Image: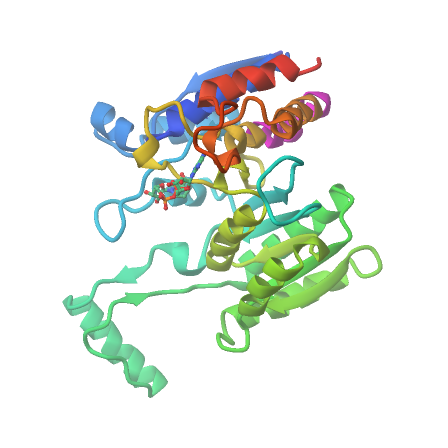
Amino acid sequence: MPHKITLIPGDGIGPEVSLAAKRCVEATGVKIDWEKAEAGSDALEKTGELLPKATLDSIKRNKVALKGPIITPIGEGFRSVNVAIRQALDLYACVRPVKTYPGVKSLYKDIDLVIVRENSEDLYAGIEFEEGRPETKKLIQEIEAQSKKKIRPDSGISIKPISKSASERIVRFAFEYALKHGRKKVTIVHKANIMKFTDGLFLKVGRQVSQNYAGRIDFNEAIVDNMSMQLVQKPNVYDVLVLPNLYGDILSDLCAGLIGGLGIAPGANIGDDLAVFEAVHGSAPKYKGQNKVNPTAMILSGVLMLEYLKEEKAARNLENAVSEVIAEGRSVTYDFKSDPNDPNIVGTQEMADAIIKKIKN
Ligand code: NAD
């Protein structure tokens, strides 16, 4: 029986990198029946909706999706479609492996850590009050009355909810992930010294959950600013990091920088019985339609998808093929090379072709 998978090409560079990933996944020999679904600005043009119900229904039906990046205009217009998908399907765990492959431009070797980011709450909950509006003024007055602290009247307000239940399930997810993947240590990252009732709660719950894994998985704690420095100085000592939503987002990009850039950082959004696989990077609109950007992050997201589908052999074959092509450096995209005129630079689909040729089934 083929696996039925929802394929969301996305917008910007999404369709190009999704096509490359789809071709590579198919070349492993795993049988997949793709169901194409729209989301993002292209969907808006065609259907009048950014995130059509049919797309969410398709993911719910098939339980697994491979998704290209989708643009989010800053500060105005629609909220992120990406965040909307994660929230609508309760994909509460964002898993982002961070690994150095030989041949990448990086100051480091041997990084092999995994970011587990809480995906459903924190400042990404989308509860915001715009500066100057009557409801914002009312809220400011209410907060001042309750907290006995002053807020400037010309403020905008974003709400940061962090719950016991969501903290507990994400930390448990991180420990279970560590056990399942033979990892040794979970580090919880927070700013509990300042935000005592949100990050403080996340940390408190994390400490409690960690006790169930004592003797099996080590546990330690780090404040997010210090963690940022530690990751730049000695990333090799970290294993699994578990973080609230915002810090997870920021440190994912930092970690992508440690392993050669956004072009190679894959990801997965996982819920209790649904999963959407996507690169860490966005839709890089300036490169749209140029067949130029690196398909590796999307292809490695395909590797994560194959693992999730329990197609372990195909996952390893595809990852090894990616690794070989990067190590040889003869058919890679521009971001692998310092000299933009390097004759070994190829386009998105040509790098995918080179990977497909290396897959040993
Ligand atoms: P971005 O990740 O799209 O691009 C930033 C830069 O990283 C690019 O200019 C490019 O230099 C590099 N880059 C990204 N992907 C690359 C690739 N595959 N190969 C080579 N280089 C690559 O970030 P941005 O410019 O901040 O965001 C653009 C849009 O994407 C925004 O609207 C943002 O909201 C959205 N976004 C979507 C997702 C998602 O779909 N999950 C994630 C992040 C950002």
Residue 307 falls inside the magenta stretch: yes
The answer to whether residue 209 is above or below residue 339 is: below
* Residue 30 in view of the camera: no
- Asked whether, in this view, residue 171 is left or right of residue 151, the answer is right
The x and y percentages for residue 138 are 20, 74
- State the image quarter where residue 135 is shown: bottom left
- Secondary structure mostly seen in magenta is helix
Closer-to-camera residue (252/173) = 252
Closer-to-camera residue (86/234) = 234
The x and y percentages for residue 68 are 42, 30
The quarter of the rendering in which ligand 1 is drawn is top left
Going by the picture, which residue comes out furthest to the right? 215
The answer to whether residue 68 is above or below residue 153 is: above
Q: Residue at x 32, y 24 (%)?
A: 289
- State the image quarter where residue 259 is shown: top right
Closer-to-camera residue (340/282) = 340
- State the image quarter where residue 133 is shown: bottom left
The answer to whether residue 298 is above or below residue 178 is: above
The residue stretch that appears in magenta: 302-314
